[in-house]
Amino acid sequence: LCKKLNIPLNGAHRALADANATLQLFQHLQILEKCPVSETESLKENIRENILPPGLNRNDINKLAEGCGVYFFYDERDRLIYVGKSKNIRKRVQSHFSGDLKSQKSLKMKHHIRRIDYQITGSELIALLLESDLIKTHQPVFNRSQRTIRYRYGLFSQLSADGYLTFSLQRFGPKGPNGIDGELVIAFSNKKQAQSFQDRIITKYRLCQKLCGLYKNRGPCFNYHLKLCNGACVGSESPEDYNLRANQAIDQFCYDFPDFLIVTKGRNADEKGVVLIRQGLYRGFGFLPEDAISALAIDTVGEHIQQRADNQDIRKIINAFLAKHPKTRIIALDK
């Protein structure tokens, strides 16, 4: 900016030099009040242009859509380096370049940006899901959150021969959770994270340590002696009573229906966005005319869906969105 406005700056980032440069900048701004409108706008435009990354100009920003969707930053080798989402793509992209860029991450990213692209989704939910999926797929260097892609451990549930709902922590094999006995409740990236979660639900729901796989002996679990377990491990609590609490621990990760569509805004007025949950798992999203949605059947809906992977971050996104927007349209799919 100083170079663009011919403001001398000797000893950049030193207090006195920066203060002098700031003073001269304010003097430039004061002059604006006395300039003709055309000169004022020209100077403002020069300042705005100077904030943009190298190789980009104001037209590149103005061409961006103002709708809801996902945007992409590419570097000098046309590699995807950042994925973001917003209800207003153009406004959000502008904020990357007009704010305080003193952080090393912001400055470094700005320096590498050579091209911007975007994809309209219309729906905030679909934008969130697409952003998360693309970050995991492409691992952009400037996206820190949601990059973890390898889930190595899972908490599984199944009924015991006595009718109790049991939990166990299992390490995934080469096929992930496939082939492991029981139903996957939640996945974790490491064992410490998994054990910490297991300890929390044992305490919160007064679950039996033995029925959670922590004790292999024939006697009661340790918490029973501390009166923190109601005695399922010794048969003094019925499976019905115990399973009520055990199911509460599971319900926080489950959807209301195993097979359903979430209907959201489309990319234009002639369509709707749909998110498919089948057999309790996220399958992807798509866009359909309103009159086609009601005719969908569970065995044909997949033809209209862009297939995407289910994972823990996706479940959090969907559950958080439905909790925040309880009036969201849901269509249960009959088998």
Image: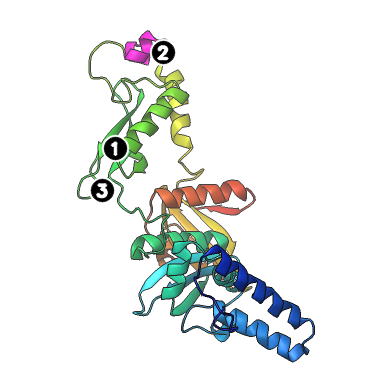
What is the count of numbered marks?
3
Q: Which residue is mark 2?
A: 237
Judged from the image, the secondary structure of the residue bearing numbered disc 1 is helix
Q: Are the residues flagged by discs 1 and 3 in contact, CB closer than 8 Å?
A: no
Q: Say whether residue 283 is left or right of residue 64.
A: left
Q: Say whether residue 148 is left or right of residue 124.
A: left
The residue under label 2 is which amino acid type?
Glu
Q: Earlier in the sequence, mark 1 or mark 3?
A: 3
Q: Which residue is mark 1?
A: 191
Judged from the image, the secondary structure of the residue bearing numbered disc 3 is loop
Q: Nearer the viewer, mark 2 or mark 3?
A: 3
Q: Which residue is nearer to you in this view: 128 or 328?
A: 128
Residue 47 is covered by the magenta coloring: no
Compared with 194, 35 (above or below) is below
Q: Which mark is residue 154?
A: none
Identify the image quadrant of residue 273: bottom right
Q: Earlier in the sequence, mark 1 or mark 2?
A: 1
Q: Which residue is nearer to you in this view: 318 or 30?
A: 30
Within 10 angstroms of label 1, few (less than 14), some, or many (20 or more) residues?
Answer: some
Q: Say whether residue 61 is left or right of residue 327.
A: left
Q: Quadrant of the N terminus?
A: bottom right
In the rendering, at what x and y percent does residue 161 appear? 28, 23
In the rendering, at what x and y percent does residue 156 appear? 32, 36
Magenta segment: 221-236
In the rendering, at what x and y percent does residue 202 appear? 40, 24
Residue 232 is covered by the magenta coloring: yes
Q: CA distance from mark 2 to mark 3?
A: 34 Å
Q: Which residue is mark 3?
A: 176
